[in-house]
Amino acid sequence: MKPVYKRMLLKLSGEALMGDKEFGISSDAIRIYAKQIKEIYDTGMELAIVIGGGNIFRGLSGKDQGVDRVTGDHMGMLATVINSLALQNAIEQLGIPTRVLTAIEMPKIAEPYIKRRATRHLEKGRVVIFGAGTGNPYFTTDTAAALRAIEINADLVAKATKVDGIYDKDPIKHDDAIKYDRVTYDEVLAKDLKVMDATAISLCRENKLPILVFNLLQEGNMKKVIYGENIGTTVVEKI
């Protein structure tokens, strides 16, 4: 059985790395994700990853602490690099070749992001982790995920969350929340479904790049995604 996708971009939130902690990185959580990433790698599919930094610092919330938005966003970008290095370490401990490429140059610890370099690493069978977002303030890591996926010609953006798809309202707070199996980009924007930010959704819509939202906490879901099983919610142009 072969994967239905040749190249995929996985979007992980920084909060996903916290596990049961209130902040920081949980070694147990990161090992679980690395194990699932290895399952994908072993199928021969090309995988790129973008990680958020919310477990360490979130630029937007930094404003509440008196931090200038641009400064806060730069701090958030550095947080994503810390997460990228932590995930790289966990993946490489499983014997998988990995490269971290950053939008802000820091040659002592990672390679600078260059599109051709990124695609070459993927072609050579390396897992590529993109750090530092887009390198610009006011853009989220969701937008960075959409942008990088388009640049490397990925077939899918898979957004890993704590819930099993997209709902019409928060399923954690509302028992009557209704889950969508498939939804259009326009519906996501019109109903403000909080899948990814509007810039990321618009980028995917313009380039007809499907988004799959699924629960990564459930073991085995990652393999179900790449084999095209009906899990989570898919965002597409038309239903």
Image (cartoon, helix red, strand yellow):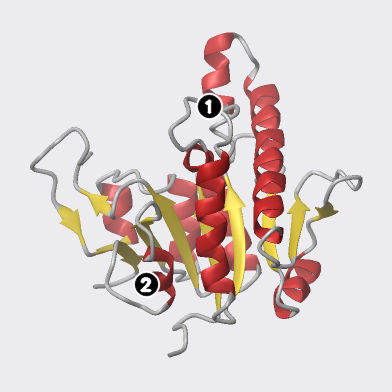
Left or right? Give the position of 142 relative to 70.
left
Res. 136 in view: no
> Are discs 2 and 1 less than 8 Å apart at CB?
no
Q: With respect to residue 69, does 204 lie above or below?
A: below
Q: Which residue is mark 2?
A: 224
Seen as rendered, the residue at the extreme top is 66
Res. 74 in view: yes
Between discs 2 and 1, the one toward the N terminus: 1
Quadrant where the image shows the C terminus: bottom left
Q: With respect to residue 168, does 212 lie above or below?
A: below
Seen as rendered, the residue at the extreme right is 108
Left or right? Give the position of 224 relative to 147.
left
Please identify the quarter of the rendering in which residue 236 is found.
bottom left
Q: Residue at x 22, y 49 (%)?
A: 167
Q: Secondary structure at mark 2?
A: helix
The percent position of residue 106, horizontal first and vertical second, equals 86, 43
Q: Secondary structure at mark 1?
A: loop
Please identify the quarter of the rendering in which residue 137 is found.
top right
Query: What amino acid is found at the position of numbered circle 1 in the picture?
Result: Phe
The alpha-carbon separation of the residues under discs 2 and 1 comes to: 29 Å
Q: Which residue is mark 1?
A: 23
Seen as rendered, the residue at the extreme left is 176
Left or right? Give the position of 22 relative to 75.
left
